[in-house]
Every structure is written in structure tokens, then in C-alpha cells.
Image: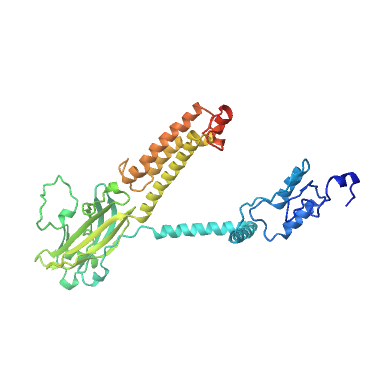
Amino acid sequence: MASQPSGETSARPALSPTHNRALSNSSVTVEQHNLSPNRFQDSLSEMVASPLPYTGLRSPGESDEKRDLKAETTAIVDEPEPVGWKASPTWIKLTLQYDLAYHYLKQRWGIFCAFLLVGIVCCSIAIGWRFRLKTFNIADPDSVHDSIVQLSANLVDVDPSGQEMILDWDIDYECEPIGCPDVNIYFDANTLRSDSSGSTISSNVKPDPIFMINGGNVLAMRNNTDRRPSSLTFRTDVAITNAPTHRTLQSYPYDKYVTQLVFFAEEVATNDSVSIAIVKTTGIAVGFNVQLQNTTDIRDDFGTVIKNIEVTRGPVVRLYAIFIVLVVWFVTLTFMATCVMNVFFGKGISSGVLVLPVGTLFAFTQLRGTLPGAPEGFGAVIDFVGLLPCLAILTFCSIFMTAVFLLRDPERDIPRWHWKQPGEGRRRNTGYSV
């Protein structure tokens, strides 16, 4: 290092080896700071020797540079550096692991994106398959060898508004053991929907047969001697009710209905009972799960079969309805927070964001229309707890966030937003104090 002139040597002490300051154990000395010609190399060496890339604190090079610039103009009294936030060893370890993982994935971003997309698609398909609607199932497959009249039911539709369920029935008449007599099939007439304008009076007497099987025609068709007889099939409109469950269509998507199928078979000539059973069921009513609730253990002397059926919304329908309600609420609360920050607290926000609630009002009603099987218009519970209050909140937010343009520029922060203390601007201008 070049030697200093004698006049300057008597005016100030010699530089310390640290080029910054000399700090003793007993007192703090006052000195003039001088820049080091190798300051960049010293900082680089210190960064390389550091055990971690960074710890979240200000780098030593940046701190020294600011101190050097200040020392060029005036002499300073070095004080112990303020103690800031110190990272714990666990935090430092997690930070290092995050940096290493980020660097590794960044170098292989293509493979990472491909695995991410495949994983999302597989998980979505698995969840959708898990919550799919179940096939209509109220059959007794074990009765296929014990029953003479074997019924196969196919679910066509469920109408919660009219509270009815449509079923198509196919008959397999295994009549060889009894000589193929003519047989009548009976259903409980009061559980079947019929034209109310008919002349039949409802009662609890034995119903009229819903279908008659001609044994001779069955044998002729099997032997291919006569194909003119009609097919062994018929349709029933079965009544369903929510009276025992107290969960009406207003409870969508948690409305629940039940019904009871009661049927038996008898020979036409002798009225002797003929064994009957449902051996196969198929079909899906879109949006509904129709399942067997239980089979009664009561047995009478006439081989009557009783099936208790439960009708509910499918899990995927319930999940989607809840998801839509949550989305509506999250969007509404976000716009409400934006309105409060801009209108009442004066935080500047882009004008494009301020007009979004107006368009969102119409988007919410369209989302409501996508709910499968929801009642027409308003009236369900999800409307009262989800859509209706959110529409009211968004309406007021739209009014306030549009009217603010008449009073000030909403894209700029008002001065009060930058005050650090209560009444700071008033104290500075008028001497006001809190």
C-alpha cells in the first residue's frame, strides 16, 4: 500500500487491516472509512466461503457498499449492528432443500410438467369413476332357480317433481314344472300412477291384474310354431314419496324419496299362488341413485314379494352442487374485500377489476342453471344460503365500486393510505393530535 503524507498521518489514525473499522473490547473508536481496491474480490470470497447460498438476510456486500458510500462524506461512529431476524437451523435447512429442489426441477421442467399433467388427469378420472352413479339394483339373483315367473326390471327415469319412477319389465315364464297354465301378475294399484280421470275408485281391495301370461302362447313362441303373440313386457309408473324422509325437492341436492313395490302372481283358473321374483335389474336414472333399501322379512301365504326402494341424488351431483356454492361464495367475498379496500380504505385498484362484479352477477345465474336436476327458478336451500345472499352482496359492491369513479380516481391511493400513524397528515398540516 502507498505511504500517506506526513500531514495526514498526524491528523488521523492508520487504517486497520479490515479496511472498515477498529473495534476494541473496551470502547468504540472514531475513524474515517476508506474504500478497499479489492472490495469486490473480498465480497466474492466471503460469499463462496458461506455454507449456504443465502439465509434470507441482507448480503454482507450490499451492507458494506452502503456503509462505504456514507463513509466517503463524513466520519461516523461505528455502533454494533442491530440484531435482525435470525433464521433457525431448521428454517435454513428447509430453505436449502427448497433451493436444491427448485433448481433440479427447473433443469427438468419438461419431464416435471409431463408427470404433473398425467397425475392430474389420472386423479380426476379416478375421482369421477369413484363417484359415478350406481346401476339400479333390487334383484334377487338367488331366486332364479326357485321362481316360476321371473321379472327383469329396467329403470327408465325418475321425476322428483311429479314424484314418480318409470320402470320397464320383462317376463321370463319358466312354466314347465307346473304345465304352463295362464297366470295373472298383480301390483299394488295404489303405488302405481294412473289417470285420475278414470272411473276406477281407489280402495284397499285386491287389485286387478296388471299383466296376464298366456301359457299356450308362451309354448308356441318357444317352439317357433306361432310368433304372433305379443311380447312379455310392460311398463309401470311407480309412485315415490318424501313423506317419511321429510326431504323435499327444496332440500336439493339432499332430497330423498322412498317407494314400495308389492307384487304377486296367481293362476287364472284356480287362483293358486305362483312363485314370482325379480332376478335382474338394469338402468340408470341420470342424477339419481335408486337402490334397494331392504327386503321385508314378512312372508304371507300367497308368495307376495315386497321391495322397499330408496331414491337419492348421486354423490357426484351433491359434490358438484356444493362446489358451485363454495365457488360463488369465494368469488363474492373476494370482490367484497376488494370493495372495502378501495372504497373505504382508499387503496388504488385497476379500473378493470372494479367493474368485474357487474359481469359476475350474470355469471352466477348461469352457474345456477348448470346444476343437474335442480328445481326451476329459486326455491332450493342452496339458493337461500348461496346464490341469493351472494347476489345481494355483489349488487352493493357493484354500486359502490362504480360510484367511486364520481368522487376520485380509484386507481390511485389516497394520501391517508400511506399514513403510518393515526392523523399523521393532519398533524403535519394543522397541528392536529390524537
Judge left or right: residue 395 versus residue 165.
Answer: right
At 33% across and 50% down in the image, what residue appears?
253
- In x, y percent, where is residue 429? 58, 28
When the figure is inspected, residue 292 is found, relative to residue 394, above or below; the finding is below
Judge left or right: residue 300 versus residue 60.
Answer: left
Residue 5 shows in the view:
no
- In x, y percent, where is residue 10? 87, 46
For the residue pair 112 and 261, the one nearer the viewer reads as: 112
- In x, y percent, where is residue 300? 13, 67
| Total count of labels | 0
For the residue pair 399 and 48, the one nearer the viewer reads as: 48
Residue 4 shows in the view:
yes
- In x, y percent, where is residue 81? 68, 50
Asked which quadrant contains residue 129, the reply is bottom left
Judge left or right: residue 338 versus residue 317.
Answer: right
For the residue pair 191 and 340, the one nearer the viewer reads as: 340
